[in-house]
Each structure stands twice: as structure tokens, then as C-alpha cells.
Amino acid sequence: MPGRTISLTVLGSGSCVPRVRRASASYLVQHGETSLLVDMGSGSLRRLVEFGFPWSKLDGVLLTHFHMDHVADLPALLFAFQNAPGLTRQRELLLAGPVGLEGVLHGLADTFGRWVLDPGVPVRMVELPGEDLVLGELEISARPVHHSRNALGYRLEACGRVLTLSGDTGVCDGLVWLARGADVAVFECANADQPPVESHLTPEEAGAVAEEAGVNKLVLSHIYPAGDEVDLVGRARRTFNGEITVAEDLMTIWLSCRF
Ligand SMILES: [Zn+2]
Ligand SMILES: [Zn+2]
């Protein structure tokens, strides 16, 4: 797409279940010269390369929570920074996530080595929510959502556009806040075949929150094998009047800048 854009590329539309079709949760967001990942579940680093993105150019990684289907490839990325031949990067890497991030990384360093904390590029570690972050022209807001301890969702804004990524969550006020007026909202719908639970969304719940928040386009993601056996769009349609898409790995959605 010509002109200035924000793009969202799905690197992992899946769950904790290993599958060829769907890597675990991960999304690439690009705006101008700035690029970041939201979550790094297993398979996502390889998907990033498959997409053709030069992985060593990433500016940041935002984590939603510490379940393995959202973080497994982060140590792999840090190890690659430490050991890949010929890297000369000096630019800082933002590493942001829930309260506890620092403890998690120190724990990994205790087990695997100091390279986790000193991967050969300067790392800026930030625990959220706290300050609203700015990376390039991307404004990053995080709010607690209802899932595991300290779990977060993200709202990214630039050039008059809003992109929301729910992380894992049930229905909660934080999710409505994050998605308010979003051009695109990527919502998990991990719960496609069970009665509603507090920690994940059914397609109907995802639709209802998107409707309440005034979302323009809803992207359903974090799909278990059972989710591929049901009509996710049709079920979200019961509660949401906007555009609905089911995420697929390596799908890109472009938003043209308003200014
Ligand atoms: Zn989770
Ligand atoms: Zn998950």
C-alpha cells in the first residue's frame, strides 16, 4: 500500500497447540522506520524471517503475559542477538512487559547465562503499566486485562490510527478501554467450544466487547484447533456489526495514516 501506513502482520495466530498452520501468539507492527513485536510465542521468530523481515532490525518487543505460548521465542531472539555472526547493531532494543518481567529475565539468566541480560545490544527493560511509552512515532499504552497475574493488553496509536491487541483475556473493563474507537482490534477467541470462562473470550464475547468499544475491524486470533472447526465470524457477527476477519499466519493488515 502506498503512502504512510501502520501495518499489522500476524506471525502467530495459534495457541499452545503446536501446528503447521498457526504458530503461537505473535504480531509484527510496523510504522515508518519503527517495528515491534507484540508477544513471541514459539514459531514466531521463524515466521518473522519467513515474512522477510530482517529480525535484527526490530526496535522492540512487548509482552502481554508470561504464558509460554506468548514468550517462548524471546530467549531465542536474545540468543540470536548475542551469537549471530556479523551483527553490528548499536541501537537500543525496548523490552516491555508486565510487572515481573525483570524477575523472569533474571531467572532465565540464572539458568542459561548472562547473555539473557546482556545480549550484545543495549536493552531497555520496562515493566508496565506505568509510563506510556513512545517508540518512533508509535504511542504505546498498556492496561491490565483479566487472565493471568499482571497480564496486559496493548493500544498502539500513530498518525491518527489506533491498533489494539488484547493479549489473553476474558471480558473486562481494561479491554474495552484498550479498544475504544480502534481502527483494528486483534482479540483472542481461544474459547470457541466451551461455555464462557473468565480468562478467555468466546467469539460472541469478543464481538460484544468490540461493539461496546466502537471498534471498526475485529480480527479474531489465538485460535485452537477446535476454533477452526466452528464459524468464528458468524458467531462474532451475532454481537458485532463491524468488519470481522479470522487471523491467519503471515496475513498483513494496512492502515493508511490520517495525518
Ligand atoms: Zn495465557
Ligand atoms: Zn495464550
Image: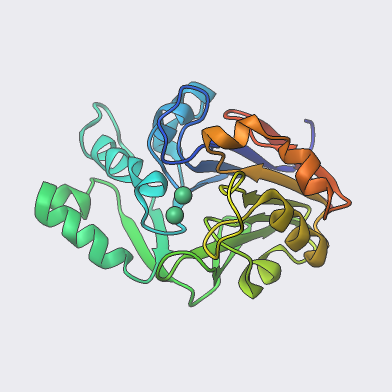
User: Foreground: 162 or 240?
Assistant: 240
User: Foreground: 132 or 34?
Assistant: 132
Residue 180, image x, y percentages: 76, 66
Residue 68, image x, y percentages: 34, 48
Indicate whether 153 appears above or below 230. below
In the displayed orientation, state which residue is furthest to the front. 195
Q: Residue at x 54, y 68 (%)?
A: 145
User: Foreground: 42 or 227?
Assistant: 227
Residue 52, image x, y percentages: 52, 23
In the figure, is residue 43 to the left or right of 32?
left
Count of marks overlaid on the render: 0
Indicate whether 18 appears above or below 66. above
User: Foreground: 216 or 237?
Assistant: 237
In the figure, is residue 198 to the left or right of 171?
left
Q: Residue at x 33, y 43 (%)?
A: 72
Indicate whether 83 appears above or below 215. above
- Residue 166 image-quadrant placement: bottom right
In the displayed orientation, state which residue is furthest to the right. 241
Q: How is the image coloured?
A: rainbow
Q: Residue at x 70, y 58 (%)?
A: 205
The picture quadrant for ligand 1 comes to bottom left
Residue 85 visible in image: yes
- Indicate the quadrant containing the C terminus: top left, top right, bottom left or bottom right: bottom right
- Residue 158 image-quadrant placement: bottom right
In the figure, is residue 54 to the left or right of 74?
right
Residue 149, image x, y percentages: 40, 70
Residue 254 visible in image: no
- Indicate the quadrant containing the N terminus: top left, top right, bottom left or bottom right: top right
